[in-house]
Amino acid sequence: AGLLAQADAARDELTASHARLVEQAEDLRRSNRDLEQFAYVASHDLQEPLRKVASFTQLLARRYEGQLDERADQYIGFAVDGAKRMQRLINDLLEFSRVGRSDDQHVDVDLDVLVAGAVGDLAGQIAAVGGEVTWSDLPVVHGEPLLLTQLVTNLVSNALKFRAPDRSPVVQLSARRSGSRWELACTDNGIGIDEQHADRVFVIFQRLHSKESYEGTGIGLALCKKIVEHHGGQIWVDTSGDHGTTVRWTLPPGTVEVPGSTDAAPGDGDRPSATPDE
């Protein structure tokens, strides 16, 4: 009888603990939704007044350049620069808060075609740094095309930005099958990420470098993480390499597989994208 009573008490405690855990999880989801709603509304409503500030400070700089003393020109320059950085921050925050709010349907997406378009849009940045972007035979996945384009654009742009000073940037996109999902990889030969910071880079507003060293808002990789998780996947930094950075992420396969999609490994069947010579 004593053992039975203990078992009943343990079961009751387990049930109560489970109920508390469910309630806490719901509270967390509600808080996250409220935070995302606040970020969306705040960033959306801030755009118009900030646009006016940016426009008038730039107008002030153009109209009165050289007519005031050097210190006044410097102050105006600070105001213009601050307004531009705030605009970038607001735009990135708005993009971050929009993930998951769209009514866009998930469809089959040919990543070969999507990556070609995304890399084409980055042709100017690629040419400016003398870089090269290649990709292997990529699969068809299931997701929102606009978000997946944003994901690829952010990862490639990041790889080009954090390049090593002594070599031209080379970025490689590849894919392999991992269980029921596709595992994608973006590998570069840049400055790399220290293993101890591998998780921190996906936290919003976290920066490993000063804004003087590298421009940015600290939202890019956090946005990538949110997009991947919106598609039911995971994203992480692979720290096993000796040089550069490899970011890996998983996505669901398309409902109809394209013949010829293979478990491509980095270096197999690379196809060059737009490069400075093109």
Image (tube, rainbow, N blue to C red):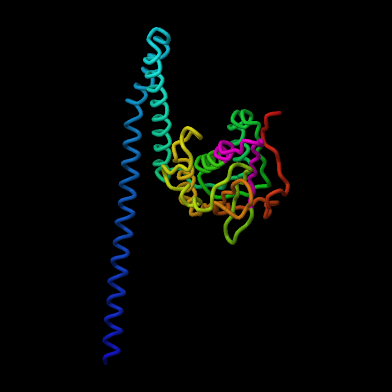
Give the residue displayed 53% in from the left and 47% down from the top. Answer: 107
Q: Which residue lies furthest to the bottom in this view?
A: 1
Identify whether 270 is placed above or below 117.
Answer: below
Give the residue displayed 40% in from the left and 18% down from the top. Answer: 74
**Quadrant of image for the C terminus:** top right
Question: In the rendered structure, does residue 164 fall within the stretch colored magenta?
Answer: yes
Identify whether 167 is placed above or below 196.
Answer: above
Q: Which residue lies furthest to the top in this view?
A: 67
The quadrant in which residue 10 appears is: bottom left
| Left or right relative to 209: residue 49 | left
State the residue in front, 63 or 115. Answer: 63
The percent position of residue 191, horizontal first and vertical second, equals 59, 42
The quadrant in which residue 158 appears is: top right
| Left or right relative to 122: residue 6 | left
The percent position of residue 76, horizontal first and vertical second, equals 38, 18
| Left or right relative to 74: residue 160 | right
Identify whether 255 is placed above or below 22.
Answer: above
Question: In the rendered structure, does residue 157 fall within the stretch colored magenta?
Answer: yes
State the residue in front, 197 or 27. Answer: 197
Give the residue displayed 50% in from the left and 47% down from the top. Answer: 106
Identify whether 183 is placed above or below 93.
Answer: below
Give the residue displayed 38% in from the left and 25% down from the top. Answer: 83
**Quadrant of image for the N terminus:** bottom left
The percent position of residue 123, horizontal first and vertical second, equals 62, 30
The percent position of residue 241, horizontal first and vertical second, equals 63, 52
Q: Give the range drawn in magenta.
A: 156-175
